[in-house]
Image: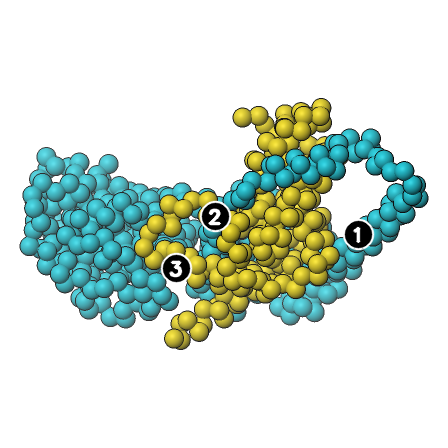
Chain colours: A cyan, B yellow
Amino acid sequence: MLSDQVLQLLTAFVDGELNPRQREEVLRLLNKSSEARELVRQLQENANKLKQLPRRKVEPSLVEDVLRSIAEAKAIPAAASAKPKRAGRRWMPFLTASLAASIIIGVLGTFYYQSMTDDKGDVNLPIAKGKIEKKPEAKVLPEKKPETKPTLETPPKKATPNPLLANLIDGTFRDFGAPIPVDRPFLAQFRDLQKEGTASGQLAYELDRSKAVQLDITVKNNAFAMDRLRAVLLERGVLLVSDPTASKKLRDKNQAKVEYLVFAENLTSDELAKIMGELSQTVVVGQKSTERQEPSPYQKVAVSKLAGDDRQKVAKLLGVEAAMLEPKDGKLVKPTPTPKIERQAVLLPANPSAGMSNEVRQFAAGRQLPRPGTLQVLIRIHQE
Amino acid sequence: MKDDNRLITECREGHTAAFGELVARYQDRLFNTVLRLVDNAEDARDVVQEAFLHAYQSLRTFKGDSLFFTWLYRIAFNTAISSRRKKRIVLSINPTGDDGKAIDPLDPAETNRPGHALEMAEEEHQVHAALAKLSSEHRAVLVMKDMDGMKYEDIAEILGVPIGTIRSRLHRARLEMRDLLQKLAEPKDQA
């Protein structure tokens, strides 16, 4: 169960109103808590729904109407000089002004009262208080937060809930950072994915945001990288089917700069994040006598949403309609508990020179329909 | 294209046409926001028109401390609130949001994809219905943040409340909106 302070942070995260340090802390929390991830996903989805509400235009345009009403009201920007010229009722402007003043005072009073009562509610929360410590409200804090442990030495207002919260709410809320860019690809170095931390947490979060993603991966050696990917996928119960042309090119040292595509689906974002983590690890190669450790050939990864053009390209390579590759909406499904080989991925040449191979044809024919809540991923692998 | 400050200067010098340019520049943006606050296109149009008139009359008081649009927005927001008070509008929302006569989508090409229009209409209906159930305070902050992409501090300035209040209002509004949208989606899932 997430506390109200954490919920507020997650909301501010969705709003893009956290500074970089708070954002990192939230990403760490997202990495640990599936509940937080799910909440952020829902809030972002709903915010997007609002953003995507159709925009309308005023028709007919208001320009003429406004200019006409300005002319009719003889409105002049210098309002003071625009006194209405009326023969009688000289008391009317004064009465109107008095009434208006009373109303304004009343309305302002109401707003002031409301905002003050709002503020009271807000400042009870540390997140809303920022650096301003207000003694009267501090009385309420310990009652609301049983986890705070006031001691004899420590006055209640200085009680720290827990280190994570303290990091998150220690008075930097007034220093808001820039909004989080929505469509910019997320970039990470594989060496940063070796340990669980900010980079891996953010990767998991980025993968969780879409139903279809593209991973643009730079490697040191295509053939070695593909062997690793094949092995890691197999451990997760995904068989990598290879187009013979692609396999041939992989073995050809003169074709080092060729780009390869790997298309997989029905992976969960968690699985994919773990696959990336495993690809970042050092590898033991060779037989008993020649056994040695090799650093991961994987260098960096850029995560972005799978664009329509790329989906069409994959569809063309697989010989299916692009609509057949549309991911499915729905709630998350649990990852396959045992690594039975029941899923397939396919290795494709980015620029095929020959027609479609039997392997690819069989993959396309044996494709399972995308399961709701899983990801489609197009991995572009190229040697640096 | 002349910037806002240049146009405002010209307005103050008595060139009403310059104000026409400002109206043309901001009418759609303002209309879309107000539409979500007052719930129907006709009222939204009236509010926006009135707001522009108020803005023109008060142009001398605009000191340029904030963006012109933020200032205009504050006037429109206050006009919308007073309009609702005058009419004592109970927040009942027409599912389509308007009568469809006065307004058109800005980008008709976007609706060309088969099934897109139906999906969008359904989604808009749900979002609109959920918005309608929010208090006007919560609705306003959500519209300003999500539809207009405003920062907390701009919203705080427009509503004349502290940033902390905006933060907590948005927080509560988002959670409430989530619950409402979930409830609205439930019958569809079960069907």
Q: Nearer the viewer, mark 1 or mark 2?
A: 2
Kind of residue sitting beneath label 1: Leu
Q: Which chain carries label 3?
A: B
The answer to whether residue A198 is visible is: yes
C-alpha distance separating marks 2 and 3: 16 Å
Pick whichever, A376 or A107, lies toward us. A107
Taking the spot 65% from the left edge, 59% from the top edge, the residue there is B136
Q: Nearer the viewer, mark 2 or mark 3?
A: 2
Pick whichever, A293 or A62, lies toward us. A62
Residue A306 screen position, x and y as percent: 31, 49
Q: In this view, does B7 lie to the left or right of A277?
A: right
Q: Which chain carries label 1?
A: A
Q: Mark 2 lies on which chain?
A: B
Q: Which mark is residue B118?
A: 3
Q: Nearer the viewer, mark 3 or mark 1?
A: 3
Question: Tag 1's secondary structure?
Answer: helix
Write down the residue under mark 2. Answer: B104
Q: Which residue lies furthest to the bottom in this view?
A: B190
Q: Which mark is residue A108?
A: 1
Residue A163 screen position, x and y as percent: 56, 58
Work out whether disc 2 and disc 3 sit on a shared chain.
yes
Taking the spot 38% from the left edge, 75% from the top edge, the residue there is B191
Taking the spot 70% from the left edge, 53% from the top edge, the residue there is B83
C-alpha distance separating marks 1 and 2: 37 Å
The answer to whether residue A165 is visible is: no
Taking the spot 33% from the left edge, 44% from the top edge, the residue there is A302
Kind of residue sitting beneath label 2: Asp
Kind of residue sitting beneath label 3: Leu
